[in-house]
Amino acid sequence: MAPSRGGLVRRLGGWRAIVWQAGLLLALAVLVLWLAGNARANLQALGSRTGFGFLGEPAGFDIPQTLVAYSPQSTHARVFLVGALNTLLVAGLGVVFATALGLLAGLLRLSRNFLGRSLATVYVEAVRNTPLPIQLLIWFNLLLLAPPPARALQLLPGVHLTNRGLFFPWAGTAPRLEGFGFMGGAALSPALTALLAALVVYTGAFIAEVVRGGVQAVSPGQSEAARALGLREAGRLRLVVLPQALRVMIPPLASQYLNLTKNSSLAIVVGYPDLVSVFGNTSLTRTGQAIESIALIMLFYLAVSLLISLALNGWNARLARGDRP
């Protein structure tokens, strides 16, 4: 049944509250329109263009790493797409690896093993209390000191770390050393490798605390019941503790994922061509249309943040109904 007019008014706080809210919205709208008109007049007085017509103009510069076809003759709209995809690549990989690292470190902090618990505690406390830009520069300079391809560090079978980046198998082909470099597989540039490492290690430390708090929020009786049923430690965590801890963990996890996505804008520090670097810096400098460029970047990050929040809130709602994660 539709709510009555009187009931709706009461829920909105009464007529006086409605008038005040309407007045504030009107004042805000007038202020926004005044600021927009003032900015437009000042830009026209300076001879600067306004509008988004620049998106269809040739960019005139190259981008070293792209996930889609791009050339200097491509438009600024294509630059935006390239930068957005590069940002989403970092954010997507960062969320996956930071979650894995945070889960491991969080569980180690609760472990009975003294060495594992101590190492996890040192990692979490050291990383959380160090500025991310400093960590990013440390990772980037460490990669520059890595050996050349001829003396590459083999991290895992088929995974090689060099001063030219990280090489790993992809699409059924494995990297192989030929001449002065690797052929086959796929590679992450030094800038992308350093950015990803910094974001994963930094965000993983915060996720570790989320995991630790979520596990500790589960009633000890649940663990005791699982032990009484004969479940081992791994089964107890996987089947009993973590599914219940997720209900507590998801809201702060969403905040950490949002922070990781926004922190990816620090890519400009190491020269990785993310959205802020190529569109908010190079394209903006060439076109001179700062307001439009910054507005588009803000809308992109807002859209990504809302999508992440929507996905995790939906997952949280499923858990609240008792659905399996």
Image (cartoon, helix red, strand yellow):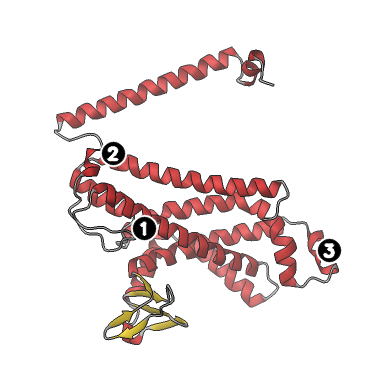
Q: Position of residue 119 (x, y in %)?
A: 58, 73
Q: Is residue 79 above or below residue 272?
A: above
Looking at the image, tell me whether mark 1 or mark 2 is earlier in sequence order.
1
Classed neighbour count for the residue bearing mark 3: other residues with Cα under 10 Å, few (<14), some (14–19), many (≥20):
few
Q: Quadrant of residue 178?
A: bottom left
Q: Residues within 10 Å of mark 2 (few under 14, many from 20)?
A: some
Tell me which amino acid carries mark 1.
Asn
* Residue with the most extreme left position: 47
Say if 296 sits above or below 274 in the image: above
- The Cα atoms of the two marked residues, 3 and 2, are separated by 59 Å
In this image, 242 relative to 275: left or right? Answer: right
Q: Position of residue 248 (x, y in %)?
A: 66, 51
Give the residue at mark 2. 292
The answer to whether one can see residue 292 in this image is yes
Q: According to the image, label 3 marks what residue?
A: 225
Mark 3: secondary structure:
helix
Lateral position of residue 307 relative to residue 276, left or right: right
Residue 86 numbered mark, or none: 1
Three-letter amino acid code at disc 2?
Answer: Glu
Q: CA distance from mark 1 to mark 2?
A: 20 Å
